[in-house]
Amino acid sequence: MNKEAFLKKLEIELKIGKNSEYTLKNYLSLNKKFFDWVKKNPEEVSEDDIKLYLAQNFSNHSAISSIIFLAALRFSYSSILGKDITANIKRPKREKKIPTVLTKKEVLSLFESLNTKKSRLMISLMYAAGMRVSEVVSLKIDDLDFDDNIGHIRQAKGKKDRIFNIPKFLFLRLKKYSEKQKSLGENYLFVGRNKKRMSSRNLQKIVKLTAKKAGIKKDVHCHTLRHSFATHLLEDGTDIRFIQQLLGHSSISTTELYTHVSSESLKKIKSPIDNLKK
């Protein structure tokens, strides 16, 4: 089987498995890059080929990059050739990095630096509901229920649905904007100039450029707003179990990452020496 036939079968397997659009594109791309480099048919690839590729192409990347590449290769070989060619390749230990978080003042500064009403609404909603960039661009007009003041996030990461509260701060603007989009016959809440769903890349670009314009020195991405949402809730005293549900995390251990981020929470902890009787 040549590379082209293998990749076509991989695409079919990914679609049958109802994998997300992101996973489909990512796994196809990672497999294609590997086969372009190795210049062998899939059946001819050896474990040593994969190790050499990792050494030459992932040495300066984070551990998660290697882990995702191996997962993509394992999926393709297991699904198409019925074997796990990566079984004996040791996965690197994943780094435990504390995510970048904006202060509340920096979030306001970011909002104030946005150029258009549409951009302000998208970015504000992302922060206000702790949404992933893919969830914002996938939001449909019918997902918003203004009578009950909630929104529905459909089939998010892990194929899970969840709800979010529409914040009072955005309620009127969001309702007006959704009514406008509906009158134009749109299905998605946010569309690009080509009248298609807004792309995640475009939204990432808006956030990146706006953060620079606002004078924020941190490395800011769309996911930074989700991290900031969770951290600020924790700092305001919200129970971590509620934050877990709002973020759509399967495990509380994922949410517990934010307990290491919240500097305000740490500031509230008194040293035992302050409680000693003098």
Image: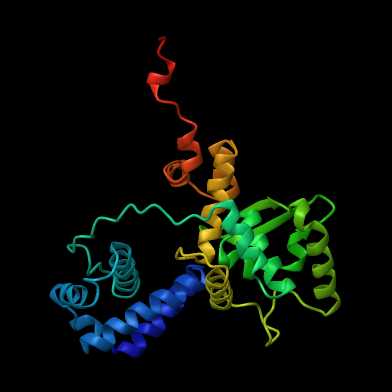
Residue under the image location 86 percent in, 76 percent down: 183
Residue 260 % position (x, y): 41, 43
Residue at the farthest top position: 277
- 2 lies left or right of 236: left
Residue 188 % position (x, y): 71, 73
Residue under the image location 46 percent in, 65 percent down: 217
Q: Where's the N terminus, which quadrant?
A: bottom left
Residue at the farthest left position: 48
- 276 lies left or right of 148: left
- 242 lies left or right of 274: right
In the image, residue 181 sits, relative to residue 278, either above or below, namely: below
Residue 138, visible in the rendered structure: no
Residue 115 % position (x, y): 68, 75
Residue under the image location 46 percent in, 74 percent down: 24
In the image, residue 215 sits, relative to residue 268, either above or below, namely: below
Q: How many marks?
A: 0
Q: Which of 21 and 128 is in front in this view?
A: 128
In the image, residue 140 sits, relative to residue 257, either above or below, namely: below
Residue under the image location 71 percent in, 84 percent down: 195
Residue 125 image-quadrant placement:
bottom right
Residue 258, visible in the rendered structure: yes
Q: Where's the C terminus, which quadrant?
A: top left
Residue 28 % position (x, y): 39, 79
Q: Nearer the viewer, residue 266 or 35?
A: 266
In the image, residue 68 sits, relative to residue 198, either above or below, namely: above
Colour scheme of the rendered structure: rainbow
Q: Nearer the viewer, residue 240 or 111?
A: 111
